[in-house]
Amino acid sequence: MRKTVFLFIVILYSVNTCLAQTPAQSRSDLEKERASIQKEIEDVKRSLDITHKNRKQTLGQLALLQKRLRLRQAAINNINQQLNFIQQDMNNSWQEIIKLKKELDTLRKQYAESVVYAYENRTNYDYLNFIFAANNFNDALKRVEYLKSYRAYREQRAENILKTQALLQSKIDGLKIKRVEKDEALVKQNKERQVLEVEKREKDQVVEQLQSHEKELKKEMNAKQRQDQKLGNAIAAAIRRAREEAIREARKKAAAGAAANTAGTAPEKTDIAKNTSGTAITGANPPAVKPAVRTAPATLFDTRADVALSGNFEKDKGHLPWPIASGTIAMRFGPHEYIKGVVHNNQGITIESSPGTSVTAVFDGEVQGVFFVGDVSAVMIRHGKYFTTYSNLSSVAVSKGQSVKMGQVLGKLADIGQLEFVLSDEKDRLFDPEKWLRR
C-alpha cells in the first residue's frame, strides 16, 4: 500500500515536470524575442544619433522616436509575460510542496507505527512461535517468506521517506530560485518603465518643436504630395505602356499561331460522283466548324517565365530584403496624421537614410523604365505582374530592358535622404511594401 503511494507521488511529479516544459520553452522564446527587441532598440538609437547631428527635428526623427517607444513597450510586455510564467511555476511548485508535505507526514506516521509494533514484538520467541505455529512444513516456509517480505517492506518505507524528503527539498530550492528570477524580472521591468517615461518626454519635445513649425511642415508636405503625384502618374504611365506592350506581344503570337495553322491545313477537294445516268453530282460541303472561344488570361503577363516570377515574388512576401541596407521608415503606407494638422496619404513607404546610400533591387526582374520625377530619378522593375519603384535617386546604374538580380545596385540615394519605395501590380493597385519586406 505504502509503496503504491510513493509510486503515485513519483508519477505525479513526472507529469508535472512534463507539463512544465512547455512554459519553460515559451520563456526561452520570450528571451529570444527580448534580445531581438533590444537589438532593434539599439539600431534605432544609432539612427537617432545620426539625426541629432543635423540639429533639426524632422518627421523621420519623430518616426524613429515613435518606433523606439513601440519597441520599449514591447519589451515591457515581454517582461510581463515572463513574470506570468514565473508566477505560474511558483504556484505549481507551492502546490506540489504542500502535497509532498502531507504525503511525507503520512509516511512518517505509518513508519513510526510499524517501528513501535516491531519494538513491542521484537523477541525471537515471538518470531519462532509464529513459524512453529504452522500446520505443516509448507505453511512454515510461507510464514518465513512473509516475515522477510514484511522486513523488506519496512526498509522500502524508510527509503520512500528519504526520497520524498529529497524531492520536497528540491522543490523548496526550486521555489527559491523562482523567487530570485521574479525579483530580477521586476527590477528589469521598473528600469524599462523609467526609460519609457524619459523617451516619451523626448518624443513630446520633438512633437512640440515640430508643431511650432507647422506652417513649414505643411509646406514641405504639400511639396511631397506634388512630388508623389508626379511619381504616381509616372508609375501609372509605365504600367500602361507595359500592358500595351504585353497586348501587342500576345497579338503577334496569336497571329503567328493562326498563320502556322493555316499553312499546315491542305485545301479540301470536292467529292464528285456519277449517278446511274452518268451525270456528275457535286458532293455536299461539310458543316462549318465554329471557332473555339478563347478565355481572357488572368494576367497579361502570362508567359511561363512571368508566371514563375510572379509566383516566386508572392512566395517571398514578408521575406524580401530591404532596398536600403540601413535606414528607418519615416512615413508608412496609407493615410497618417504625423502631428496634429499634418496629414499625408503615402502611396508607398518613405525610408530615411544617408544621402549617397546604395539602393538595391528587392527581387529578380527586368527594368521596366528609368525616368525623372522632378529633379530626381526613379527606377521601375517588373517582377512578372508586380512592379517595384525606387524614387529619389541621384544616379542610376541600370537601363530599361536590363535584367537585374536581387540585391543588385540600382543607383544612389539623392541629397534629400529619403527613398520612396512603391509596390504595385499590373492593374495599378498599390500594396503596403512593409508587409512584403523582411521583418
Image (cartoon, rainbow, N blue to C red):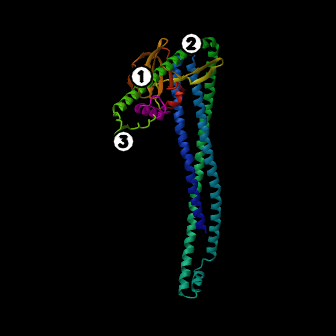
Q: Secondary structure at mark 1?
A: strand
Of mark 2 and mark 1, the one earlier in the sequence is 2
- Residue type for callout 3: Asn
Q: Secondary structure at mark 3?
A: loop
**In terms of depth relative to the viewer, which is nearer, 139 or 21?**
21
Q: Which residues are magenta?
A: 291-317
The residue labelled by disc 2 is 223
The residue labelled by disc 3 is 275
Circle 1 crowding by C-alpha within 10 Å: few under 14, some 14–19, many from 20: many
Residue 296 lies, with reference to residue 232, above or below; the image says below
Percent from the top left, x then y, of residue 408? 40, 25
Whole-Å distance between the Cαs marked 2 and 3? Answer: 90 Å
The residue labelled by disc 1 is 367
Q: Quadrant of residue 341?
A: top right
Q: Secondary structure at mark 2?
A: helix
Of mark 1 and mark 3, the one earlier in the sequence is 3
